[in-house]
Image (spheres, rainbow, N blue to C red):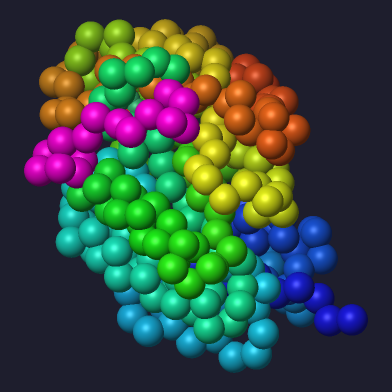
Amino acid sequence: MSKKKVLVAGGAGFLGSHLCEKYIENDFEVICMDNLITGNADNVKHLFNNPDFSFVKYDVTNFVHVSGKLDLVLNFASPASPIDYLKMPIQTLKVGSLGVHKTLGLAKEKGARYLLASTSEVYGDPLMHPQHEDYWGNVNPIGFRGVYDEAKRFAEAMTMAYHRFHNLDTRIVRIFNTYGPRMRLEDGRALPTFVGQALRGDDITVFGDGSQTRSFCFVDDLIEGIYRLSMSDEIYPVNIGNPAEITIKEFAEEIVSLTGSKSRIVYKELPKDDPQVRQPDISKAREVLGWEPKVNRTEGLKRTLKYFEELILKS
Ligand code: UDP
């Protein structure tokens, strides 16, 4: 019997590259597709000699063709860090709309299951805490972050429309803040920025007074949750994240202490529409996927630091 075949759109990105590995380990043949605007072929180069892996440089906002059968489409194509989508607002909206449409069309054509990477950003600056999947969110459609948040909200609507109208077998994961090896040091997000600053001894730039909260999930836990969702029967969105909530100020202090850095914390203006709180309610993931995170922040941060230290040494 031939292996199951999965297309990972955005497969050379932070999460995509871990997914490529995960599905290869689980006996899938993997096609990794990425236009490399924020992804990096280095993230998957260790897979290039694997006969079950192939890489296609392609922008999924155009018609997507894959020859032969396809069992699963994982759509992880999008800029995902605030500075990236602020720099590329139109591409972000295009990949979240046209890219979702094209990859859904491909899944329909192939009779493949489709999993959409959605986000906690669909909850915006949430008025419900922690965020449960039933919450509809508080997003400013014309704000700077709207290009990402609204694209993902549209993507969810489009995915459900394909499910309801075309009977497509779909899954939606709402991903909360995630960290780990293969994040880009310069992607502007809190963790790589703080780690880079701490390792170089530069000031740590906390935005606002640092009282805003996030809940950080180690990448291996997240990937396991996504894998389980892709194998489950759950059609409606599922939050995957680590509920361990922390203020950004405490997070910065934790990184300073873990790195033994002499860096001091300085405070900069809070970006507009920056969510004040964020914490996933993962009761649904626990119930329907039997999943919960296993790696605590200290352990996860140690593994991530090791990656960044090696990266800095190499550069
Ligand atoms: N942040 C910060 N300093 C930085 C980068 C980010 O204080 O150099 C803050 C940011 O304002 C937000 C939190 O850290 O409140 C998490 O930001 P990130 O970009 O990692 O992800 P978000 O959850 O906002 O998408």
Give the percent coordinates (x, y) of residue 117.
47, 51
Q: Position of residue 299 (x, y in %)?
A: 67, 22
Q: Is residue 227 left or right of residue 39?
A: right
Q: Nearer the viewer, residue 297 or 41?
A: 297
**Would residue 136 be visible to someone looking at this image?**
yes
Residue at 46 percent of width and 32 percent of height: 133
What residue is rendered at 52% in x and 23% in y?
281
Q: Residue at x 44, y 68 (%)?
A: 165
Please tell me whether residue 173 belongs to the stretch shown in magenta: no
Question: Does residue 27 appear to the left or right of 152 in the view shown?
Answer: right
Toward the left, the furthest residue is 142
Residue 260 in the image: above or below residue 156: above
Q: Is residue 185 above or below residue 31?
A: above
Provide residue 172's location: percent of width, then percent of height.
Answer: 51, 50
Stretch of the chain drawn in magenta? 131-146
Q: Residue lying furthest front in this view?
A: 165
Magenta stretch secondary structure, dominant: loop
Residue at the image point whose x is 33% and y is 33% from the top: 136
